[in-house]
Image: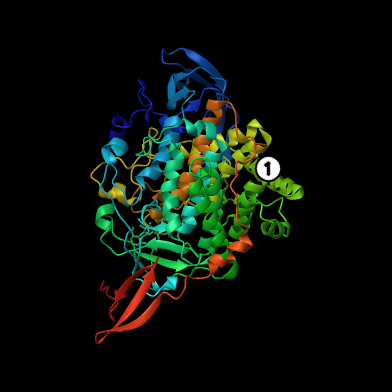
C-alpha cells in the first residue's frame, strides 16, 4: 500500500506481519485514546481468551470474548464485542487468540485521533475553489487554481435578466463533493456543523494548526477555513435579500482537474426559500463566532441573516425547482419549515429580537422521534440551539429540546447494546451518504454528552468514529489516507484526474448504500446492508465524498480528541459573547426594497442601448446583450 510511505503520522508504524485471521477482527485502524473506550468486533471467538501483547511480545491484558451477537446490518455473522479499555498505557499492541494474530495493530496514545481529526478538516482546504493549492500546504496534492467564479452567468431561474446584468462575481467557497458545484443548502449545514465544532471546543481550536495559507494570522485556523466558504455564501445573496440556490455548470463536467473544468460556463441558479433560510441560520451563528475577531464581518453576517429571513418571510412556499436545462445536483425535497425554525432560533439567540421570540413561542418542541440532521431536515439544529442555551430560550422549550436530544441518544444506545459490533446504526441508516448519517448520530450523541456529561454518550459517539475507521464488516477505513485498509478510489474529480495513486487525504467516503443504482448495484446486499459498498470511483452512490459528510465526522472525531486533550467539554452555562448593537428587524425592512430602477433604454446616435446602473456605475449594452462600455 503505497499510501503508507507518504502520509506522515497517518499510518501505524508496525513490526507485525499480517495474519491469516487479520480480517476476522474489525477495529478502528487508526488509534485509541489512552483513557478512552477501546473495543473490537471479533468473529468466531466466543468464550476464548484474547491476548493483547505489547511490542516486546509481553501480554499486557487478557479479555475473555463475550457471547457472540449478530448485528443486522452486518448480516448473519455474529461477533463478540471485545472491550479492552483497560489497556491504558500508550504504545502499539497486537491481539492474539492463542498464537494467531487477529485484527490490525492497535495504536494507543493521548493524541491517537489527532492526525485523522485534523485531516478531516484539512479536506475543506483541498476543496477550495478559486485558489491554487501550493505544495507547502497541499503536499503532493498541490494543484492549479480552479473556478475563479468572477464571471458567473445568471440563470433565468434567478429572476435576473441577462440582457441587463450579464454576470455576477461569486468566488471562493468549497466544492460540494466529487463534483465542482457549490450548493447553498448543503454548504449551510456543513458550515454550521463546523462553526459548532469551534463553538464547542474553542480553547482546543485556538491552538490547533491546520497548515493552511492563513495559519500565521491571529484567527484560529478552523475559523479561517470556514470563512473561505462564508465569503462565498455572502456573494450568493441577491440585492433583495433572497439567496441563490446553487452555483454550477448546467450539466456535470467530466472527470477533469479543477483548472480544466473551469472553462465550462457556470451559472447561479434559482432563488428560493430553503437556501435563503439556511443562509440566514448560518450567518446568524457566524455573526456571533467572528465577533471577537472581525466585528465588521460579524455585523455584515447578522445583517445578511436578517435580510435573508425577511425575504423568506415574503416568499414562503417558493421552493427550488430544478429548471429543465439543468442537471447538476438538485438538492430539492427538503423541509423548509425545519430550516425556518432553525433560522428563527439562531437569529433570536444573537439578536434577542422580540419578533423572533414571539414566533418561537408558537412552536411546540417535540420530545420524541429522533430526526437525524441532514441537508433535507434542519429540525435538530434548532433543537441543539435551544437545548444548549437555557439562559436565552423559554424554559419549557429548553426542557423539551434537552429531552429530545437525550431520548434520541438513548435510542441509539439501545441499538448498540445487543449488537456484536457495538455500533448505533440500524438497517434503515444505509442509504446514500450512510457515513454522514452515522456521523450525525455521533453529533447527537455528543450533544447528549454536553448536556449530561454522561460517559456512555461519549463512548457511543466514539464507537461511530470506530465504525468509520474500520470497525465494520468489510474491514474498511472510510477515511482516505488513514488506516491499514482505507478507501482508495473515491468519486472525487480532483483525485481521479491527478496522477497520484493516493486520493486526497482526510475524505470520508459516502459509505454503504443498499440501494445504489450506479456501478455499485451488484454490491447491494439487503441481508447485510453494511456490506453494500464498492471502492471504485464509478460509484458516486457509495464512494463519493461530500462536505456535508466530512463535517459531522470532523465534529465527532475532533470533539472526542479535544475533550480528551483538554479534560473538559462545552459548558452550556457559558454566555455567548455577542455585544454589538443590532438594528431592530422592523427598521431593516427598508432593506428589502430593491434598489431604484436601475435600467433604462436610451437612444445613442441611431442605436438603442440599455443603460444599466450598479453601485452608481453605469454600463451600456447593445440589443444583443453585449457590453459596449
Ligand atoms: O459526479 C456526479 C456526482 O457528483 C453526483 O453525486 C452524481 C449523482 O447526481 O452524478 C455524478 O455525475 C454522473 C452523472 O450523474 C451521470 N454521468 C456520469 C457522471 C459522473 O459519474
Ligand atoms: O447527498 C445527496 C443525497 O442525499 C441524494 O440522495 C443524492 C441524489 O440526489 O444527491 C446527493 O448529493 C449529491 C449532489 O446532488 C451533487 N453533489 C454530490 C452530492 C453527494 O453525492
Q: Quadrant of ligand 2?
A: bottom left
Residue 110 image offset from top left, x and y in percent: 49, 23
- Relative placement, left or right, of 466 versus 522 is right
Q: Residue furthest right?
A: 396
Q: Quadrant of residue 516?
A: bottom left
Residue 573 image offset from top left, x and y in percent: 67, 37
Count the labels in the image.
Answer: 1
Front-lying residue, 70 or 627? 627
Residue 161 image offset from top left, x and y in percent: 39, 75
Residue 437 image offset from top left, x and y in percent: 53, 48
Q: Quadrant of residue 313?
A: bottom right
- Relative placement, left or right, of 107 versus 134 is right
Q: Quadrant of residue 91?
A: top left
- Relative placement, left or right, of 621 versus 306 is left
**Up/down of 335 relative to 445, above or below:** below
Q: Secondary structure at mark 1?
A: helix
Rendered-image quadrant of the N terminus: top left
Disc 1 C-beta below 8 A from ligand 2? no
Which residue, given by chain and number where applicable, does mark 1 sit on? 406
Front-lying residue, 250 or 22? 250
Within 10 Å of disc 1 (Cα), the crowding (few <14, some 14-19, many 20+) is: many
**Up/down of 170 relative to 1, above or below:** below
Say whether residue 78 is visible.
no
Front-lying residue, 432 or 250? 250
Q: Residue at x 36, y 38 (%)?
A: 212
Say whether residue 424 is visible.
yes
Front-lying residue, 91 or 377? 377
**Up/down of 76 relative to 258, above or below:** above
Amino acid at each position: 500500500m503505497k499510501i503508507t510511505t507518504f502520509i506522515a503520522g497517518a499510518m501505524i508504524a508496525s513490526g507485525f506481519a499480517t495474519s491469516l485471521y487479520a480480517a476476522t477482527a474489525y477495529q478502528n485502524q487508526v488509534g485509541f485514546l489512552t483513557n478512552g473506550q477501546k473495543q473490537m468486533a471479533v468473529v468466531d471467538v466466543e468464550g476464548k481468551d484474547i491476548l493483547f501483547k505489547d511490542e516486546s511480545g509481553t501480554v499486557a491484558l487478557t479479555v475473555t470474548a463475550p457471547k457472540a451477537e449478530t448485528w443486522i446490518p452486518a448480516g448473519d455473522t455474529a461477533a463478540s464485542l471485545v472491550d479492552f479499555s483497560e489497556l491504558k498505557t500508550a504504545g502499539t499492541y497486537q491481539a492474539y487468540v492463542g498464537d494467531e494474530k487477529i485484527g490490525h495493530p492497535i495504536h494507543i496514545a493521548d493524541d491517537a485521533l489527532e492526525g485523522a481529526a485534523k485531516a478531516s478538516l484539512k479536506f475543506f482546504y483541498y476543496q477550495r475553489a478559486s485558489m491554487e493549492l501550493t505544495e507547502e500546504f497541499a503536499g503532493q496534492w498541490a494543484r492549479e487554481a480552479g473556478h475563479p467564479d468572477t464571471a458567473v452567468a445568471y440563470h433565468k431561474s434567478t429572476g435576473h435578466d441577462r440582457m441587463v446584468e450579464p454576470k455576477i462575481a461569486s468566488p471562493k467557497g468549497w466544492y460540494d463533493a466529487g463534483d465542482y458545484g457549490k450548493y447553498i443548502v448543503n454548504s449551510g449545514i456543513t458550515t454550521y456543523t463546523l462553526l459548532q465544532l469551534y463553538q464547542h471546543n474553542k480553547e482546543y481550536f485556538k491552538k490547533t494548526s491546520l497548515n493552511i495559507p492563513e495559519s500565521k494570522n491571529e484567527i484560529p485556523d478552523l475559523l479561517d477555513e470556514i470563512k473561505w466558504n462564508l465569503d462565498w455564501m455572502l456573494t450568493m445573496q441577491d440585492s433583495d435579500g433572497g439567496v441563490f440556490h446553487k452555483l454550477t455548470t448546467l450539466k456535470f463536467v467530466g472527470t477533469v482537474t479543477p483548472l480544466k473544468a473551469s472553462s465550462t460556463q457556470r451559472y447561479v441558479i434559482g432563488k428560493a426559500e430553503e437556501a435563503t433560510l439556511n443562509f440566514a441560520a448560518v450567518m446568524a451563528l457566524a455573526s456571533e463566532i467572528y465577533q471577537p475577531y472581525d466585528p465588521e464581518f460579524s455585523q455584515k453576517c447578522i445583517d445578511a441573516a436578517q435580510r435573508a429571513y425577511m425575504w423568506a418571510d415574503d416568499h414562503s412556499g417558493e421552493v427550488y425547482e430544478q429548471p429543465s436545462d439543468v442537471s447538476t445536483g438538485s438538492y430539492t425535497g427538503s423541509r423548509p419549515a425545519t430550516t425556518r425554525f432553525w433560522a428563527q432560533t439562531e437569529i433570536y439567540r444573537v439578536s434577542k429580537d422580540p419578533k423572533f421570540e414571539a414566533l418561537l413561542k408558537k412552536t411546540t418542541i417535540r420530545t420524541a422521534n429522533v430526526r437525524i440532521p441532514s441537508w433535507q431536515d434542519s429540525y435538530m439544529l434548532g433543537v441543539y440551539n435551544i437545548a444548549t442555551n437555557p439562559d436565552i430560550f423559554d424554559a419549557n422549550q429548553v426542557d423539551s429540546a434537552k429531552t429530545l436530544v437525550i431520548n434520541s441518544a438513548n435510542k441509539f444506545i439501545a441499538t448498540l447494546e445487543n449488537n456484536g459490533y457495538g455500533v448505533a446504526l440500524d438497517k434503515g441508516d444505509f442509504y446514500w451518504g450512510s457515513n454522514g448519517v452515522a456521523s450525525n448520530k455521533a453529533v447527537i450523541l455528543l450533544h447528549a454528552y454536553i448536556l449530561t456529561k454522561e460517559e456512555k454518550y461519549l463512548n457511543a459517539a466514539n464507537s461511530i468514529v470506530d465504525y468509520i475507521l474500520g470497525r465494520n464488516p468489510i474491514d474498511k477505513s472510510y477515511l482516505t489516507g488513514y488506516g491499514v485498509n482505507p478507501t482508495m478510489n473515491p468519486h472525487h474529480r480532483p483525485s481521479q484526474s491527478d496522477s497520484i495513486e493516493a486520493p486526497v487525504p482526510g475524505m470520508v467516503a459516502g459509505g454503504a448504500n443498499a440501494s445504489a443504482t450506479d456501478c455499485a448495484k451488484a454490491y447491494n446486499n439487503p441481508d447485510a446492508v453494511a456490506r453494500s459498498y464498492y471502492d471504485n470511483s464509478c460509484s458516486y452512490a457509495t464512494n463519493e465524498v461530500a462536505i456535508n459528510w466530512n463535517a459531522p465526522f470532523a465534529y465527532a472525531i475532533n470533539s472526542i480528541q479535544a475533550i480528551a486533550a483538554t479534560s473538559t467539554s462545552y459548558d452550556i452555562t457559558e454566555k455567548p459573547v455577542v455585544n454589538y448593537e443590532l438594528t431592530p428587524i422592523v427598521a431593516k425592512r427598508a432593506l428589502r426594497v430593491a434598489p431604484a430602477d436601475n435600467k433604462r433604454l436610451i437612444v445613442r446616435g441611431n442605436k438603442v442601448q440599455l443603460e444599466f446602473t450598479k453601485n452608481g456605475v453605469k454600463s451600456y449594452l447593445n440589443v444583443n446583450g453585449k457590453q459596449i462600455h
